[in-house]
Amino acid sequence: MDGITPGHPALSVQDLEVTFPTRQGNLRAVAGVSYVIEPGRTLGIVGESGSGKSITALAVMGLVPAPGRRSRGHICIAGDELDTDNDAAMTRIRGARVSMIFQEPMTALNPVLTVGAQISEAWALHHPGEDDAARDASLDMLARVGIPEPTRRYKSYPHEMSGGMRQRVMIAVALACQPEVLIADEPTTALDVTIQAQIIDLMAEVQEAFGMAIQFISHNLGVVSEIADDVAVMYAGRIVERAGAGDIFSHPLHPYTQALIATVPRIGAHVPRLPAIKGTVPHPLALPSGCPFSDRCPRAVPACREAEPALTDHGAGHLAACFRAGERS
Amino acid sequence: MSTAPLLEVTDLTKHFPVGGGWLGRGAGRVHALNGISFSLHAGRTVALVGESGCGKTTAARTITRLYRPDHGRVLFKGEDLASLSGTALKSARRAVQMIFQDPFGSLNPRLPVATIIAEPLVIHGGVDRAEQRRRVADVMARVGLDPRDGDRYPHEFSGGQRQRIAIARALIIEPDLIIADEPLSALDVSIQAQIMNLLKDIRDERGLAFLFITHDLAVVDHFANDVAVMYLGHIVEMASRESLFAHPRHPYTRALIDAVPVPGAGKRPRGRAIGGDVPSPIDMPPGCPFHPRCPRAIAACSTIPPKLNPVAADSGHAVACHNPEPEPAP
């Protein structure tokens, strides 16, 4: 793959802030988020609705919906800083260096174009003057994502395919130009579990073949656990914990991560009641003072309501933003 | 169990015609529900579990007579719901309430929540206004809502609170059976546990029976007494929760359990996913509906539809498979 400069992570996001002006004031949907993903690695981003995980992804793509905007921070792909406000520049980047797939491929794919035309279009956009090769490249890509009978399926429309097949097509469109970074926003959430397992298999397979970095966004801890090398947990527009996948599930440090892991029902784990997290995710314009989780936290102390804890290293690259990180409940 | 079941479903079948042909005739049929049978006793919970298109929602809607069955019988407290109409159907429906997946779509946005919650009382009558208000306040408090919020509108509530409103509406006329169709799926992870605990508490304190429809096996294992696994309109395996999870016998049940991602279990070993897609319910495969995807399929599977048969004489565990997973070693 061209474009990977040794020594640079595939994707680096530093101090990202995304703001939406509203009548009640500036809403910070993403409030200072930093992370890197190395080539061939997968970062899972976990969070509930409103945590800022999707807006973070859209900011990397330069697709924050107006009137929102990136108000601070730097985004680099293989060391090259992106000018996400520059549409012309981003058009050259999107698809070629960073691609995105979404939860519902039916709305992300064009319903009036054949799937072959959509993959060819993505390919041809970044290979000017090579239109003749586009069809072959697309057929090759359809085969790689596991579409049976690619020559016949090339001429199919999205509505003629199942949800799982459409997500495979979406992945083929995204990977047509072999980008360095693939962002997947809840790519398996609309799929049945047996199909979800197939798509997770496929993503690991294409990553091995192409070596791209994957940012995998999901609300489902189990899915993230199956695909991620590293995991970041987001809450109220912030990363509150980040660590290797094995580490974060076996030794979560932040009370929110601990509560989130404990609250998921599991087959074979018979408890009379699930440990629920009290309350709801706070509105971003009405965050509690200090730590944004302090009003729901079972272990909050007065200090938690006075200042916001910074994301700090608790050893071996395990980061957590909590004054009481690591204390077992 | 010696007592008569609260709900007894026998050979329930529902097909839908699909468009095309002369005036829509003769084009094809969606085989949504192909003769399912099960029974549910008072105070027990049966889960219908399966993936999209398996017929679990059609089953719920046919049982409550939102759809008229093509064939089969639904006995509720010994009365055949399929033959009832008018007042008799209305009074039977009083004892069966539903909770839906989407608390945004299932609540009228133009009514204050106290009116929404009181509606079943108004429909089924017999209660004066003061008593209505008292019961609404009681049930709101019970599901964890502030009774003073009764004059607010659904959009002012979060998804989890709206599901509490839907639960309050279902409870207010003290039904015997609640049919819950994916009641947790639209909620955030941290809210799902709150709602599941609430449903469990209410079920246990009121001795309610539940028909719980879901795609989530972990939820089933947490909530159900008995489980029916559905595929393409058929029940392919039925057992007590303990027996089903300890010794799944149908290859589809096995695949479904294996496909559930477990937090902290590490990366998925590649190539364990079963292949293929669920076939169209319009062009049903001959024989066993699962045979095109089945890792254990034998010759008979593509021609002879397997019947749901008990796996052991006494266990109540039944499977519809010509070549089931081996019996556990004693």
Image (cartoon, coloured by chain):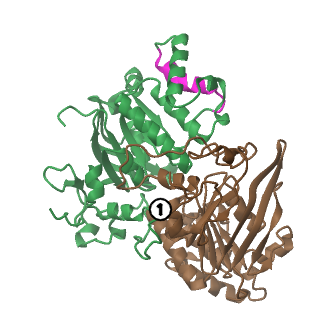
Chain colours: A brown, B green
* A209 lies left or right of A35: left
Q: Nearer the viewer, residue B32 or B243?
A: B243
Residue under the image location 19 percent in, 63 percent down? B327
Q: How many marks?
A: 1
For the view shown, which residue lies furthest in the left direction? B313
Quadrant the N terminus of chain A occupies: bottom right
* A173 lies left or right of A268: right
The subunit letter for the residue under badge 1 reads B
Which corner quadrant of the image does residue B300 belong to?
Answer: bottom left
The residue range painted magenta reads B109-125
* A191 lies left or right of A49: left
Residue under the image location 53 percent in, 21 percent down? B136
Q: Is residue B9 visible?
A: no
Q: Position of residue A283 (x, y in %)?
A: 70, 44
* B220 lies left or right of A223: left
Q: Nearer the viewer, residue A319 or A41?
A: A319
Q: Is residue B195 visible?
A: yes
Which corner quadrant of the image does residue B79 belong to?
Answer: top left
Q: Nearer the viewer, residue B140 or B173?
A: B140
Which corner quadrant of the image does residue A127 belong to?
Answer: bottom right
Q: Position of residue B62 (x, y in %)?
A: 40, 40
Q: Position of residue A321 (x, y in %)?
A: 65, 58
**Was residue A28 drawn as part of the magenta stretch in this picture?**
no
Q: Position of residue B200 (x, y in %)?
A: 41, 38
Residue hosting label 1: B263
Question: Could you tell me the amino acid type at mark 1?
Answer: Pro
The local secondary structure at tag 1 comes to loop
In the displayed structure, would residue A140 be above or below residue A54? below
Residue under the image location 68 percent in, 61 percent down? A311
- Magenta residues, dominant SS class: helix
Check disc 1: other Cα within 10 Å, few if <14, some if 14-19, many if 20+.
many
